[in-house]
Amino acid sequence: MQKKNKGRIYLVPTPLIEGEINTIPEMNRLIVASCRYFLVESFKTGRRHIRAMVPAFDLDSAVLEQLDKSTPVEDLENLIEPVFQGHDICVLSDAGCPGIADPGSRLVQLAHHKNIEIIPLSGPSSITLALMASGYNGQQFTFHGYLSRNKSELKIELRKIEQMANYATQIFMETPYRNLSLFNQLTAFLSPNVQLCIACDLTSANSLVKSQTISQWKKQTAPNIHKRPCIFLITK
Amino acid sequence: MQKKNKGRIYLVPTPLIEGEINTIPEMNRLIVASCRYFLVESFKTGRRHIRAMVPAFDLDSAVLEQLDKSTPVEDLENLIEPVFQGHDICVLSDAGCPGIADPGSRLVQLAHHKNIEIIPLSGPSSITLALMASGYNGQQFTFHGYLSRNKSELKIELRKIEQMANYATQIFMETPYRNLSLFNQLTAFLSPNVQLCIACDLTSANSLVKSQTISQWKKQTAPNIHKRPCIFLITK
């Protein structure tokens, strides 16, 4: 009996702004076009990304399953099952790179354990783009994900982050509707000479990237970041 | 007298493997095609990237200047001069994203200071790709750049990194001809239960991504990483 080759798992970045397909490399589109098994963060957005990348894609012939942060560990084995029947799987999050501030890493972990080949594809990452655009140290940096929402805990966290900013760029994010509240706390808690970069709506025509000290930020009206996806970066 | 609009500075990622142009988004190629001022990490590789991205590009009509880690600060003002005459500038490093473990950040810093619009473009970053492929925590991570080459200093550094690996993925790199020496020191100095991922030659057909514990690495012959570009990742 002939043994089937195992499929591979492709990690496929998606546009940061839905439909901005010219931020996606040709290679990713070719791989999506040839794939029939997809793990998507949400069905609606996943389908839209596939259609935007490959307009002629026949979605009826594809199998889409959901993989998000609430997917139970015990379901992951089932989700990678097609690989053992020789099929490739594409993993797509709603925006940006799977596994980076987005679901995917637990599945990849399991895939390593099962000796499945993992192929990460190039594409938009808001963290990488923000770091490039900030002009801050890109030789040493730390990404914290989300900071605490508790005011007194946040104060302590920011004190640590401010110290670490001596050696490495400090990067974090917030859910968009809380951006302004975080901005206000940053200007309240950080030292006047600390550099803060705000990188907002990256890859869109309305992107905003501004690097200046806390004291300069304080002199101006708050930036227009309400409900817009933002990355915050700090250095000294 | 009509005031000319200021040009913009585009940060343009280049392929990790020369010529692998299908890892580059269409947008980047359009912007390179329309640009006449380039800052490149090295002339030879810069020219090759431009030609690979835009085969019909007339290099004789373009102005290329070098921007690398040894470019004196006082030269940066001259390098951005075309922007004030209304020209866009594309910044290209030899491989990957300008400003991330590559030259570019000091120029971007100056550009912020001069109120020049910075536009970072999407594309290959070995750090981002390695983190995606590792299966390690992508919600919290630290990139250290190069670790110390002094053996006793490295030992102390790795002790700290091992502790930090409790909370965040730890990422670093080495010059390719020293990869095996670093690998030997990692297996000698790190605890047996620490997870080490080696991500090598990413985006190439011969890429290698392997995540396992130090004790598992020790049981096998050393990986084939000599003189191949690698990213090292550690977690617990």
Image (cartoon, coloured by chain):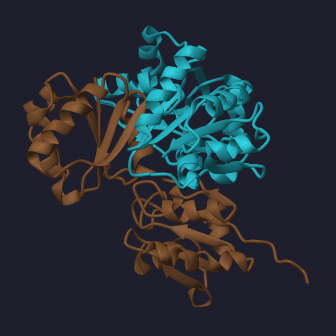
Chain colours: A cyan, B brown
Is B169 left, or right, of B111 in this rendering? left
Residue at 62 percent across and 89 percent down: it is: B61
Give how far across and how far down residue A210 sits, in percent: 67, 50
Give how far across and how far down residue A82 sits, in percent: 45, 24
Query: In the picture, residue B90 is in which quadrant?
Result: bottom right
Q: Is residue B33 visible?
A: yes
Residue at 47 percent across and 35 percent down: it is: A162
Residue at 67 percent across and 50 percent down: it is: A209
Give how far across and how far down residue B95 sits, in percent: 42, 62
Residue B52 versus residue A146: which sits nearer the camera? A146
Residue A121 versus residue A157: which sits nearer the camera? A157
Residue at 75 percent across and 77 percent down: it is: B86
Q: Is residue B13 above or below residue B221?
A: below
Q: Is residue B194 above or below residue B40?
A: above
Is B102 left, or right, of B230 in this rendering? right
Residue found at the far right of this picture: B1
Query: In the picture, residue A81 is in which quadrant?
Result: top left
Give how far across and how far down residue A123 sits, in percent: 55, 47
Residue found at the far bottom of this picture: B60
Q: Is residue A188 above or below residue B55?
A: above
